[in-house]
């Protein structure tokens, strides 16, 4: 496959999926002389906003469905991350000798700068932003994108002046990896997720595992020592090819981790070793809520320090960073009740991490698109911390079967009604937490729209 943009001229390339990634990729390809077709199952009316962005760009469109003829008449098919590679039409194209790949793998072949790649089930975006801020405040020019924010094809449009690229990488983006070779890999954690896309957990893990496919002696992997699934993954010979740093909240692991390099959080300090000396960072003033935030800080800190971020810049950023929107985001206090927006919690582990941040008396709003997840792993924490459980969306019946017996539970028809009932059930000292444990696509365009609507409703309370 192509390794230089000059090879794209006159190549027939089909882009499948016309959201932000598809638009950016099509523009990049046209810029370098490719003959581009965009195919999307949505109609022209549904894609009107994206079509406006393509005004003046010479491409061919196939909208409202996919036809075999279009897919066979190509030199290459490139998929946006949201498009499953397992559709029958892709199998047919492959059987006829047409190469199928993903936008991230395709674009990574043209990247010359070192890449810090961040994956895992939860925490990717926060770790990516922290790494970016640690480096930026140290005077290091970075580009931040991938799964959250700008797709990699946007960087290729120019000016391509970053010293390092920080990429949040989802399992969807990793499915097509063949040659992608990051300089640094951060693996935050690993838990059941996306079982509407993958047939089982093993398929999901195998997609994630591809981030290590091309590791070598120059690779530094930064891994969560407190996550058994990640530790098990680290035994893979591919991971062992480079340097490994671990991070942990367990004081008992400090001697082992400080010996090989990594970070350990002990009380109000992070102990870090990336070189010959151990250094310390203060946790006393951090604004982010939840013990998982300390894990995120350690992961980002190790990558940034290894790349040359300054101690003072890291500490100042730690003290001032309040967290990302829709991730345990404090909304407001009304009548002695606090409201938190954790709309980005789209899997079971994310709900557990959110509940870990509170002591008790939580009124929890859960539910959304049913993605075949199992909710029984959070039974014990629901029993201990949740006084009222309010369930919505496609998955409400599944969630109710798994955990509905362990708190006062209501199954509600609309999102707005769910938030109103949560407020009505609350008393002084309670916390109302939106932490859905599901994706948002049954009711909303995305988790951002869901979180913003929650905040809109809450901000009307008096």
Image (spheres, rainbow, N blue to C red):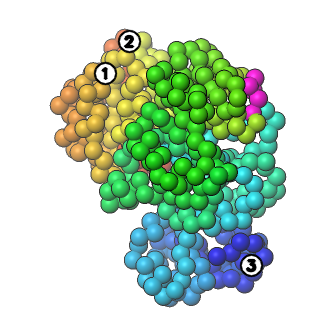
Seen at 47% across and 17% down, the residue is 333
Q: CA distance from mark 1 to mark 3?
A: 58 Å
Which quadrant holds the C terminus? top left
Res. 199 image quadrant: bottom left
Q: Is residue 141 left or right of residue 234?
A: right
Residue 171, image x, y percentages: 48, 55
274 is higher (above) or lower (below) than 55: above
Q: Is residue 169 left or right of residue 430?
A: right
**Circle number at residue 7:** 3
Seen at 57% across and 66% down, the residue is 178
Camera sees residue 125:
no
Residue 61, image x, y percentages: 59, 77
Seen at 20% across and 28% down, the residue is 406
- Disc 3 residue crowd, few under 14, some 14–19, many 20+, Cα 10 Å: few
Seen at 74% across and 25% down, the residue is 311
213 is higher (above) or lower (below) than 142: below
Q: Which residue is the site of mark 1?
A: 385
Query: What segment is highlighted magenta in the picture?
Result: 309-313
């Amino acid at each position: 496959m192509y390794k230089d943009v000059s090879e794209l001229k006159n190549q027939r390339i089909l882009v499948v999926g016309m959201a932000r990634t598809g638009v950016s990729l099509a523009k990049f390809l046209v810029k370098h002389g490719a003959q581009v077709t965009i195919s999307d199952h949505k109609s022209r009316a549904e894609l009107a906003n994206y079509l406006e962005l393509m005004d003046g760009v010479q491409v061919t469109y196939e909208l409202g469905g996919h036809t075999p003829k279009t897919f066979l008449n190509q030199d290459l098919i490139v998929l946006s991350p949201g498009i499953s590679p397992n559709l029958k039409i892709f199998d047919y194209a492959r059987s006829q000798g047409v190469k199928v790949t993903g936008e991230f793998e395709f674009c990574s072949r043209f990247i010359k700068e070192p890449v810090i790649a961040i994956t895992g089930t939860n925490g990717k975006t926060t770790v990516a932003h922290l790494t970016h801020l640690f480096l930026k405040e140290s005077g290091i020019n970075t580009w931040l994108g991938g799964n959250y924010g700008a797709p990699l094809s946007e960087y290729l449009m120019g000016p391509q002046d970053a010293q390092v690229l920080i990429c949040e990488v989802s399992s969807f983006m990793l499915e097509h990896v063949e040659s992608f070779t990051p300089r640094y890999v951060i693996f935050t954690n690993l838990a059941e997720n996306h079982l509407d896309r993958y047939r089982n957990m093993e398929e999901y893990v195998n997609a994630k595992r591809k981030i290590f496919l091309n590791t070598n002696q120059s690779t530094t992997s930064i891994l969560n020592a407190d996550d058994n699934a990640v530790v098990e993954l680290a035994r893979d010979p591919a991971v062992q090819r480079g340097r490994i740093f671990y991070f942990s909240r367990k004081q008992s692991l400090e001697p082992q981790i400080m010996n090989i390099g990594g970070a350990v959080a002990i009380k109000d300090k992070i102990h870090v070793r990336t070189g010959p000396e151990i250094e310390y960072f203060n946790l006393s003033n951090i604004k982010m809520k939840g013990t998982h935030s300390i894990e995120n800080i350690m992961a980002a800190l190790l990558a940034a320090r290894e790349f040359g971020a300054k101690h003072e810049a890291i500490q100042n950023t730690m003290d001032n960073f309040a967290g990302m929107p829709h991730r345990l985001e404090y909304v407001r206090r009304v009548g002695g009740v606090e409201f938190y927006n954790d709309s980005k919690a789209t899997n079971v582990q994310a709900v557990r991490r959110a509940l870990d941040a509170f002591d008790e008396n939580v009124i929890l709003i859960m539910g959304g698109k049913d993605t075949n997840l199992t909710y029984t792993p959070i039974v014990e924490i629901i029993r201990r911390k949740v006084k009222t459980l309010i369930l919505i969306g496609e998955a409400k019946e599944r969630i109710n079967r798994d955990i509905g017996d362990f708190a006062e539970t209501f199954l509600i028809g609309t999102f707005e009604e769910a938030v109103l009932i949560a407020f009505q059930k609350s008393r002084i000292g309670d916390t109302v937490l939106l932490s859905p444990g599901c994706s948002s696509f049954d009711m909303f365009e995305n988790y951002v729209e869901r979180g913003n609507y929650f905040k809109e409703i809450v901000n009307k309370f008096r």
